[in-house]
Image (cartoon, helix red, strand yellow):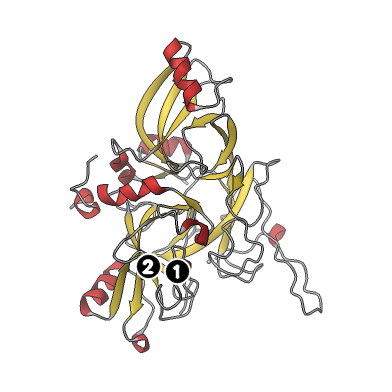
């Protein structure tokens, strides 16, 4: 288990619809033995298939395979394969955390952090590229109290300014009666509490909020389908189980929000428009999904997507700069596993590249897809 403003693109910062229909082609791209608690009921001799049974949470990840790395401490259980449902994706169960926005309860998961020490302390993926959000008016303010009171966020998915990317503010003096940013700041103004602004940025996607929940898929057939949750969040045990998707190289990820509001309902995820700015300041990593070629578990029905970098590497970010690839001559299609191959094939003219998806080109968008688990790719093509 373990800032610069626009003018610098991502590459400079770190070192330097298709035929299937646009909106349905977006961002998502499965293993270890299935936990016994996840076993589906025996099939009955009937024309109607049994309802797939999502995995039950356990106290710790079932990491029996030494080649699998759980990157996020809040992962309680996972299943890489799809033995218990028809769709070609796995599952991952997270611990939920309670917070407040505008006096209402929210529930969120924790995945990534811009600060190495905080990431190690909290069991998050260290993502240096998130520091590019500094001074960019992208992040959602997050207030963390020294007395353990529920954290307060500035925005929820009800707000057009919402983003899963948050900037931490440490509050000393207590927070039991504080349930909104306005209340926190008023208490600081009166001297009742002290706020310390930090420059630590975290990726804390909200799963449940006042009037809404990230969508549940009751069919378990497609990577996007009707949603990214296997069921309603378990509020008794404070857990949530989500779809886990495969991507090259060796990463398994979830899908939570996108910077293009018009796409969010079609993907059954949250809109987070401010994260679009991460493309301008170098806070994203490229990902390519395939619109044709070798059939597989990718969201468009073809091979898994390709990250430019492996999750957890310094040049990787959970906030994707999303591209779509299409084979010019589909008879030449083959399984592609690296970004180097992608760039060579684009240069040679074998692959056609679209910003976002063909319907949005040349305008791209960002999709928030944290990768809580590393595991070998098992796609055979």
Q: Which residue is mark 1?
A: 25
The single residue placed furthest to the right in the displayed view is: 45
In this rendered view, identify the residue nearer to me: 119 or 324. Answer: 324
Q: Are marks 2 and 1 in contact (CB under 8 Å)?
A: yes
Residue 274 position within the rendered picture, expressed as x and y whole percent measured from the top left: 37, 45
Task: Please identify the quarter of the rendering in which residue 322 is found.
Answer: bottom left
Q: Which residue is mark 2?
A: 357
Q: Earlier in the sequence, mark 2 or mark 1?
A: 1
Alpha-carbon neighbours of circle 1 within 10 Å: few (<14), some, or many (≥20)? Answer: many
Q: Is residue 67 left or right of residue 127?
A: right
Q: Is residue 271 left or right of residue 341?
A: right
Q: Is residue 111 visible?
A: yes
Q: Is residue 62 visible?
A: no
Which residue is drawn at the image coordinates 66% and 62% (left, top)? 218
Q: CA distance from mark 2 to mark 1?
A: 7 Å
Which residue is drawn at the image coordinates 47% and 80% (left, top)? 295
In this rendered view, identify the residue nearer to me: 353 or 250. Answer: 353
Residue 128 position within the rendered picture, expressed as x and y whole percent measured from the top left: 32, 44
Tag count: 2
Alpha-carbon neighbours of circle 2 within 10 Å: few (<14), some, or many (≥20)? Answer: many
Residue 142 position within the rendered picture, expressed as x and y whole percent measured from the top left: 45, 32
User: Which circle marks residue 105 in the picture?
Assistant: none
In this rendered view, identify the residue nearer to me: 282 or 127. Answer: 282
């Amino acid at each position: 288990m373990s800032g610069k403003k626009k003018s610098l693109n991502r590459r400079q910062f770190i070192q330097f619809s298709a035929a299937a229909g646009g909106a349905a082609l977006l961002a998502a791209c499965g293993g270890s033995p299935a936990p016994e608690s996840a076993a589906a009921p025996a099939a009955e001799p009937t024309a109607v298939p049994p309802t797939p049974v999502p995995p039950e949470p356990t106290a710790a990840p079932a990491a029996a395979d030494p080649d699998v790395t759980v990157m996020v401490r809040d992962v309680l259980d996972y299943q890489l394969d799809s033995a218990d449902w028809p769709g070609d994706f796995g599952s991952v169960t997270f611990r939920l955390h309670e917070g407040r926005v505008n006096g209402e309860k929210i529930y969120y998961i924790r995945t990534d952090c811009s600060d190495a020490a905080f990431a190690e302390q909290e069991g998050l993926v260290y993502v240096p590229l998130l520091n590019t959000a500094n001074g960019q008016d992208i992040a959602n303010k997050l207030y963390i109290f020294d007395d353990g009171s529920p954290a307060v966020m500035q925005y929820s998915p009800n707000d057009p300014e919402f983003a899963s990317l948050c900037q931490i503010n440490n509050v000393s003096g207590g927070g039991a009666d504080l349930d909104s940013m306005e209340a926190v700041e008023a208490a600081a103004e009166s001297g009742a509490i002290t706020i310390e602004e930090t420059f630590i940025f975290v990726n804390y996607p909200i799963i449940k909020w006042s009037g809404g929940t990230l969508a549940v898929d009751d069919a378990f057939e497609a990577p996007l389908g009707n949603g990214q949750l296997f069921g309603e969040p378990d509020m008794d045990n404070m857990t949530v189980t989500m779809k886990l998707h495969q991507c090259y190289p060796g990463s398994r990820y979830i899908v939570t929000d996108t910077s293009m509001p018009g796409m969010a309902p079609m993907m059954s995820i949250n809109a987070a428009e401010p994260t679009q700015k991460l493309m301008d300041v170098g806070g994203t990593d490229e990902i390519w999904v395939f619109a044709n070629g070798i059939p597989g578990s990718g969201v468009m029905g073809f091979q898994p997507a390709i990250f430019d970098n492996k999750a957890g590497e310094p040049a990787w970010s959970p906030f994707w700069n999303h591209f779509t690839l299409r084979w010019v001559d589909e008879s030449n299609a083959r399984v592609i596993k690296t970004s180097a191959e992608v760039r060579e094939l684009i240069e040679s003219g074998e692959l056609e590249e679209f910003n976002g998806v063909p319907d949005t080109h040349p305008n791209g968008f960002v999709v928030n897809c944290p990768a809580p688990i590393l595991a070998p790719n098992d796609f055979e093509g």
